[in-house]
Image (tube, coloured by chain):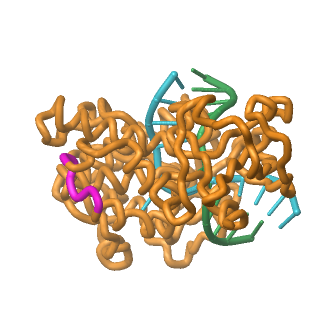
Chain colours: A orange, B green, C cyan
Amino acid sequence: MNQFAEKLINWQRQHGRHNLPWQTSDPYRVWLSEIMLQQTQVATVLEYYPKFINRFPDVQSLAEAEQDAVLQLWAGLGYYSRARNLHKAAQQIVYEFGGQFPQQRIELERLCGVGRSTAAAIAAFAFRQPETILDGNVKRVLCRIFALDGDTSDKKFEAQLWQLAESLLPKNQNDMPVYTQGLMDLGATVCKRSKPDCTHCPMVSDCLAWAQNRVAELPRKKSAVPIKHIAFYWLILRRDDGAIWLQKRPQKGIWAGLYCVPCLENLQEIESFGLDDWQEYAVLTHRLTHRLLEITPLLATHFFRQPEDLGSGVWVQPQNWHEYGLPKPLAQFLPQIVL
DNA sequence: TAGGCGTGGGA
DNA sequence: TTCCCAAGCCT
């Protein structure tokens, strides 16, 4: 067996993580965890994963669910296309694959929201297939050990990393789960982006970045993308009984599929709601990865035209807000305007 | 193919 | 405060 895999496997057994709730060979649980963990930290996922498993314990129950029920459990976790694709993929498994997860990576990639790395993780953890993952952790580990200074967002360089990662796989397929977990654990707990703990790294004697004193500069940073500012209004319509008017957002764009108050790009649009008065709140900012939302909440309590006439939506009482998947900043703001 | 897509945490 | 980015994928 190659030395890299052997060292990593031994290190994982002694020093890796072994108590994460998704460490199982059940493909459903592995799949769900991999989707939740995309661009999301373990500590955050630990808050959502048990609730999701409790409500949808298997792929059948998820396939039969309403999209709103799935998004409700996902609300606050971000990247909501993951939830919509998760729901679609559950239906693919039940109705196209006869309720059984495919075992080959290439087949798993047919599932909505499952790319090569996620497919490889499922194939490795659940079916011991000799497939490598290549997530942010693995890219960082490889760039350091082999002192590679390419741009990890560059497709050609990424292709080289895939090839390198494949060449490092253990020969014994039974080692695939512990090896794959070791890759993730090493990147997450030792070979971290900042303040890597090289003195406790099982690979330090092989690490070219360490030998060249270049650990801090690898992997190379990609050029920063300028952040766009987006300004809009939230029109909060509150009925005399305290209910708020919520609309399901379109299936594309920010907060797709979630429930939200009407968003207006300018104050002229407010005329269509037939308002004669409203209260304006201070601008609240909400930062996304590549956008800065500048939201001005408007509260209206007297309106002579019913919003039902302007589009579909639902009146929701404050005690029932939690039953709807709301964007995080809205869920945080709404309590301020409770009667 | 490069930009779109959330939220939270660390420095 | 401000910036970067974390178990990526889709179009």
Report the front residue among A43 and A74: A74
Q: Is residue A150 above or below residue A9?
A: above
Q: Quadrant of residue A208?
A: bottom right
- Image label count: 0
Residue A176: x and y in percent read: 24, 55
Q: Is residue A329 visible?
A: yes
Task: Determine whether, in the image, residue A225 is placed left or right of residue A111.
Answer: right
Q: Is residue A273 above or below residue A186?
A: above
Report the front residue among A314 and A17: A314
Magenta-drawn segment:
A55-60
Q: In which quadrant is the C terminus of chain A drawn?
A: bottom right
Residue A59 falls inside the magenta stretch: yes
Q: Write the residue at 18% across / 42% down.
A: A101
Residue A84: x and y in percent read: 41, 40
Q: Is residue A205 visible?
A: no
Q: Is residue A197 above or below residue A74?
A: below
